Image (tube, rainbow, N blue to C red):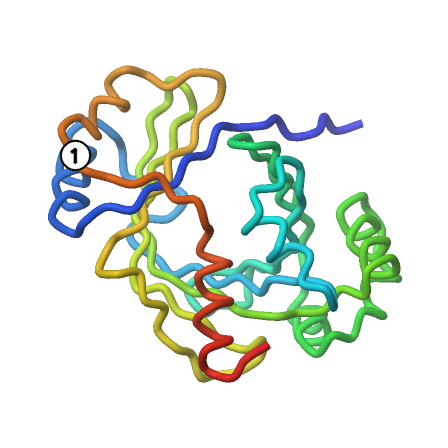
Amino acid sequence: MQAAPKFRHERKYHLAEADAMLVRQRASYILAPDKRAGGPYQVSSVYFDDAHNTSLHQKRNGVFLRDKWRLRYYNNSFGLIHLERKHKRGELARKEHAPVTEEQYMELCRADMRCAALQEGPVWKAFYARHLLNCMRPVITVEYDREAFSYAPGNVRLTFDTNLRAAMPGSGYSVAVDTGGLMILELKYDSFLPAVVAGLLSGIQFTQLAISKYVMARHALLRHGGR
């Protein structure tokens, strides 16, 4: 039996663009460009929530234990799509995922959950069980541009996210999400954070994010008549 993924530390920060560029410059000397990405890339995630917007309210209220469900793909390509369950325990997070076909993706974006009922594997089964219990449906597509760096000690991953956008699932029209001119930096690592990585933020003015890109995007879409 495959071991469950381990929890990782996950921190998110808001930085002014000039400060973010300074951190990026420092990172380019110490960290390696993410080999999986091969350069900057676009991330698209279709998030699910129930009729009571439980996931939205749990995040805004800082609930310690919570799950987030999403479909994720990259660079506007449906060649690789995953159904992803992100389990949060305070600042710790772990992800489990299962492959999704383009046809399944289209069905799920239409809130047609019949395909989920037919799938095997723990992620699909947990997703469908959650749907039966809470009537899950797709609520938003969150998009952004990302540049990623990695550092082997501590299994560190540092990402810079810009151009945050929100759209209704399946829609080709998106709205810009106002981040106040600030860039979003994410720092993820296993059991320890190497001092050399922690030093990248030395002397930098930053705010640790209390809300997620998902919450910011939901608010932006609601202001534009979304749900």
Q: Is residue 116 left or right of residue 203?
A: right
Q: Is residue 220 above or below residue 100?
A: below
Image location of residue 31, percent across then percent down: 25, 30
- What residue is at 62 percent from the left and 35 percent from the top? 64
Q: Is residue 121 above or below residue 221?
A: above
Q: Is residue 153 left or right of residue 120?
A: left
Q: Quadrant of the C terminus?
A: bottom right
Q: Is residue 213 above or below residue 46?
A: above
Is residue 135 or residue 180 the one in the foreground? 180
- What residue is at 27 percent from the left and 15 percent from the top? 195
Q: Is residue 114 left or right of residue 168?
A: right
> How many numbered markers are drawn?
1
- The outermost residue toward the front is 61
- What residue is at 42 percent from the left and 79 percent from the top? 174
Q: Quadrant of the N terminus?
A: top right
Crowd rating for badge 1 (residues with CA inside 10 Å; few <14, some 14–19, many 20+): some
Is residue 96 or residue 57 the one in the foreground? 57
Q: Secondary structure at mark 1?
A: loop
Q: Amino acid at mark 1?
A: Ile
Residue located beneath label 1 in the image: 204
To which quarter of the image does residue 157 belong? top left
Image location of residue 175, percent across then percent down: 39, 77
Image location of residue 85, percent across then percent down: 66, 47
- What residue is at 11 percent from the left and 48 percent from the top? 18
Q: Is residue 111 left or right of residue 173?
A: right
Image location of residue 34, percent across then percent down: 34, 40
